[in-house]
């Protein structure tokens, strides 16, 4: 991932709520639904309500960004 300043950041460097959402998005993009579900389940079990709320906000921010992403009318075919 990249910050707004252009610095590359790994999901492990992010706070738990940001990292979980980032890892779940990356897993979904890679087609690994089980890994994405594991990340989201961990967020659901988080005992701190502030972290759960932050995770929800981060997920909504990602969803907004992904829905607004410019994509071609005909996406590239999958490799292989």
Image: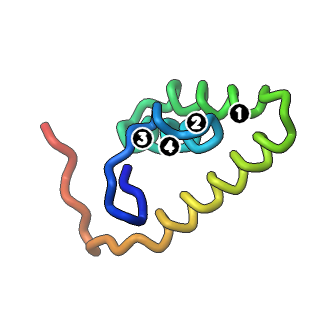
Distance from Cα at disc 1 to Cα at disc 2: 7 Å
Image x and y of residue 68, in percent: 47, 73
For marks 3 and 2 on the same chain, the one whose residue lies earlier in the sequence: 2
Q: Are marks 3 and 2 in contact (CB under 8 Å)?
A: no
Distance from Cα at disc 3 to Cα at disc 2: 10 Å
Instruction: Classify 66 as above or below 52.
Output: below
In terms of depth relative to the viewer, which is nearer, 20 or 27?
20
Distance from Cα at disc 1 to Cα at disc 3: 16 Å
Quadrant in the rendering for residue 41: top right
Residue depicted at x 59% and y 30%? 39
Residue depicted at x 53% and y 33%? 36
Distance from Cα at disc 4 to Cα at disc 2: 5 Å
Q: Which residue is mark 1?
A: 43
Quadrant in the rendering for residue 40: top right
In the drawing, does residue 20 fall left or right of residue 9? right
Q: Are marks 3 and 4 in contact (CB under 8 Å)?
A: yes
Q: Residues within 10 Å of mark 1 (few under 14, many from 20)?
A: many
In the drawing, does residue 53 fall left or right of residue 10? right
Q: Which residue is mark 4?
A: 22
Q: Which residue is mark 2?
A: 20
């Amino acid at each position: 991932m990249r910050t707004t300043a252009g610095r590359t950041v790994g999901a492990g460097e992010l706070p738990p709520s940001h990292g979980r959402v980032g890892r779940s998005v990356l897993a979904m993009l890679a087609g690994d639904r089980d890994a994405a579900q594991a990340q989201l389940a961990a967020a659901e079990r988080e005992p701190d309500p502030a972290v759960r709320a932050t995770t929800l906000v981060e997920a909504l921010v990602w969803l907004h960004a992904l829905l607004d992403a410019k994509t071609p009318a005909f996406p590239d075919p999958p490799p292989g």
